[in-house]
Amino acid sequence: MRPWWRELIWSWRGVTARETGAWVPFGPSLFYNLMIWFAYYVCELGRSRFRRPAFTIKVEPLDIGPWYLWWGVIYRAGGRFVSDARQADVAVYFENLARVNPVRPAGPDLYLNYDCVNITKGHLVNVFEDVFGYDLGVDPRNHEGPMVRKSEDNGKHDGAIIQGPAEPEPGWVYQRVIDNRTTDHRVADLRCPTVAGRIPLVYIKERPVSRRFDDFNSRCRLSTAEAHFSDEECDLIARFCHKMRLDFGGLDILRDNTSGRIYIVDVNKTDMGPPLALPLMDKLRSTHILAQAFRNVFRI
């Protein structure tokens, strides 16, 4: 298993994730965010330290760093990390690449995300349209007006709105523009952690319209699936997760103001979180909710 620090490339200007290429520059905002995250980390570690281990878990090929949502959920659920799969109750495949080809180790009774081998944006579009019955993707050659252009790969945050028609480029996908603007000139993304297709909670992430595709939230609130999705939509989301073979991960869902329809625009098996902009008590509450769902759904 590769330690988490080997996945980062350090320079005097900032830090780059080796697999995704995402870059975070050094600056006041970075150190401010580190302070916010550290408060959550200390609280989560403290309240889990005296919890009796309930199950053992083997993670490969990467370590799960404490800035990932997986980390807080596993600790809060009573998981204990082990290095030998033969000693593990649960095995988790954890890697940032959009396409993977994992091999299951012998030993564990439960395997999570080993069958979720393709989360590229193109595959997401195909699965979404098959399940929901309406289009997310567009043909850039024939599309008139604005459309979203984004990389196939995971974690790039390189989306942009361009004008069509345009000649498609290899490695990029093209999607319709979803009008998820709020009344105060922001956009609202519904980040939905899923456990076997179920949505235990929703993070409402808001940012200025001008920063629509940035990895930044000016405000974040904790909510429920019932407050945002109908029973039929929840069933379709569960079917989508099943077809993606996603056991545990996060979906970015947008609701279009014009049509009222929902669109799943991103699938993430290695969620960062809880979101930095979420108040500390809600961070801790969300970890507790997800940990309970994790144990109840997977019966560990």
Image: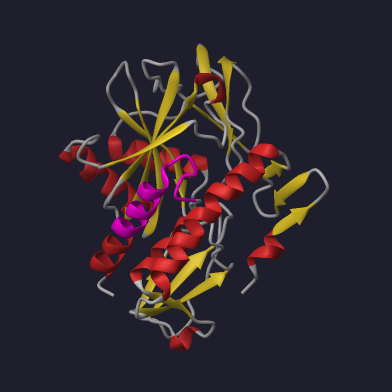
Which residue is farthest top?
Answer: 145
Name the colouring of the figure: secondary structure
Q: Quadrant of the C terminus?
A: bottom left
Residue 114, above or below 172: below
The image shows residue 67 at horizontal and vertical percentages of 54, 56
Q: Looking at this view, is 68 or 198 the one in front?
A: 68
* Residue 251 % position (x, y): 40, 44
Q: Which percent across, then down, holds residue 270?
A: 50, 55
* Magenta-colored stretch includes residue 282: yes
Q: Residue at x 23, y 43 (%)?
A: 234
Q: What stretch is highlighted in magenta?
A: 273-290
From the viewer's side, name the closer residue of 119 and 144.
119
Pick the front one: 273 or 103: 273
Q: Does the magenta stretch include residue 185?
A: no
Q: Residue furthest left?
A: 231
247 left or right, relative to 85: left
